[in-house]
Amino acid sequence: MKSKPVDDDHMLSNPVQRFHQTLIDVVPPDQLVNAASWKEEFLKHKSLTGDDRRTFAETMFTQLDDLGLLKNKRVYIGPGRDGSSDDKLPIDMKFAPISTRVAFNKTWKDQGYRKTTFGLFEDIDSDQWMIIEEQAPVDAIVDLRSLGDEFKRAKPLKIIVIIHPECENPAGLREADENPVALLALNPDFVFFEEQDQDFFE
């Protein structure tokens, strides 16, 4: 059943629209036979390290600029983002975040969905996007106020969280010298406060 498109493409700049198409095209058509879905194949073919990571994250935030938004927002990538199917991946984008918490439905958790999180740190190697979570459980929460020495105890300016099926052989999520953080407990009161103004809905 066709659903409502998740964003108005007419508001997106040509570079952002082209970028969405390149993300769709990264999965070869012959990988989508036998009922395989794009969302299950995407991370097997798309590297998210180095310049590829930077381009991915910055273009996603450029989409928010195109939409006139400067607040937390969930967007989607994939062929289903036009409302034609459920073959899409949610991307949560947060400004000045205190945690990696995301909203999710029970089906995603039951299906073993994971999340991979990248953060922009202004005082680490000149505005570098660094991995914070690598295929963590979708209900995992990292307290971004308590990051360790590998992040110079800095808090990210913004984060991008990819919610996705588990991928056994990703093309590239982290550099050899990167170490995603261990899960750190949050005070539930702070989680509640942060999430009140989020626009993360299915």
Image (tube, grey):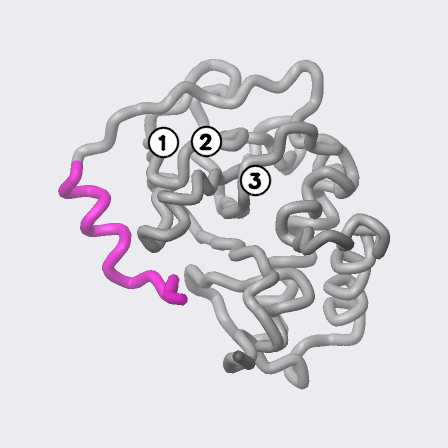
Q: In this view of the protein, which residue sits in the foreground, 15 or 21?
A: 21
> Left of 9 or right of it: where is 140?
left
Q: Residues within 10 Å of mark 1 (few under 14, many from 20)?
A: many
Residue 73 occupies quadrant: bottom left
Q: Is residue 14 above or below residue 79?
A: below
> Left of 133 or right of it: where is 63?
right
Q: Position of residue 27 (x, y in %)?
A: 79, 51
**Label 1: which residue?**
142
Mark seen at residue 88: none
Q: Earlier in the sequence, mark 3 or mark 1?
A: 3
In magenta stretch: residue 197 = yes
Q: Amino acid at mark 1?
A: Val
Q: In whole angstroms, how far apart are the C-alphas of marks 2 and 3?
A: 19 Å
Image mark count:
3
**Label 2: which residue?**
136
Residue 196 occupies quadrant: bottom left
The segment highlighted magenta reads 188-202
Q: In this view of the protein, which residue sits in the foreground, 194 or 154?
A: 194
The quadrant in which the C terminus is found is bottom left
Element type at marker 2? strand
Residue at horizontal 57 percent and vertical 31 percent from the top: 131
Mark seen at residue 120: 3
Residue 38, visible in the rendered structure: no
Q: Position of residue 183 (x, y in %)?
A: 36, 23
Element type at marker 3? strand
In magenta stretch: residue 105 = no
State yes or no: discs 1 and 2 in contact (Cβ < 8 Å): yes
Residue at horizontal 36 percent and vertical 31 percent from the top: 142
Q: Residues within 10 Å of mark 2 (few under 14, many from 20)?
A: many
Q: Amino acid at mark 2?
A: Ala
State yes or no: discs 2 and 3 in contact (Cβ < 8 Å): no
Residue at horizontal 68 percent and vertical 55 percent from the top: 35
